[in-house]
Amino acid sequence: MNATKTHITGIRTVSIPVDDQDAALRFYVDTLGFTALRDNPTPNGGRWIELAPGTDDVIVTLEPAAPNMTRGTIGIRFTTEDADAAHSKLEAAGVDTDNILRWPGVPAMFAFRDPDGNTFSITEAT
């Protein structure tokens, strides 16, 4: 296979659409434990907010959602060392979580939703 080189070298950020950047920032930092890396104003009146979910190289941004944007599953699978502990902590914080899925030969995982209705997954690192 002869692939065309595009000079793309990786993924820097994954954007999450949110209605209220302040509320989303509180949820992702205070509830999920993300680290705020940057919070700067943008010319359109919004903010450029960058968060780190852990020590990984991928950054999450909280961007103002377009009007009438449908929310649902975002293909982000966060990782944890302990799915049971992560699930218990999120449930105790009042986060909308699904049951932990346990399939033979597959890491334990569960879905959760942020206050904007975006759905993510947490998968146990193996």
Image (spheres, helix red, strand yellow):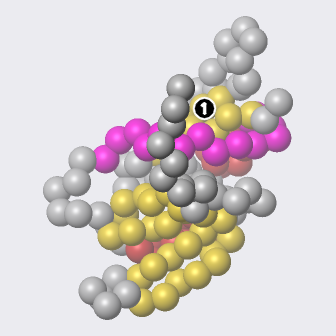
Report x, y in % for residue 20.
36, 71
Residue 30 appears in the rendering = no
Element on which disc 1 rests: strand
Splitting the image into 4 quarters, where does residue 103 fall?
top right
In depth, the one of 60 and 2 nearer the eye is: 2
Say if 74 sits above or below 27 in the image: above
Report x, y in % for residue 75.
48, 40
In depth, the one of 12 and 56 nearer the eye is: 12
Residue 41 placement, left or right of 31:
left
122 magenta-colored: no
Say if 94 sits above or below 81 in the image: below
Residue depicted at x 65% and y 29%: 109
Type of residue at label 1?
Answer: Phe
In depth, the one of 93 and 103 nearer the eye is: 103
Looking at the image, which residue sits at the far front? 2
Residue depicted at x 68% and y 71%: 35
Say if 86 sits above or below 57 in the image: above
Residue 65 appears in the rendering = yes
75 magenta-colored: yes
Q: Which residues are magenta?
A: 71-84
- Report the quarter where the C terminus lies: top right
Splitting the image into 4 quarters, where does residue 33 fall?
bottom right
Label 1 sits on residue: 110
Report x, y in % for residue 61.
49, 66
Residue depicted at x 56% and y 72%: 50
Report x, y in % for residue 36.
63, 75
- For disc 1, the neighbor class at 10 Å (few under 14, some 14 to 19, many from 20) is many
Say if 37 sits above or below 88 in the image: below
Residue depicted at x 24% and y 47%: 70
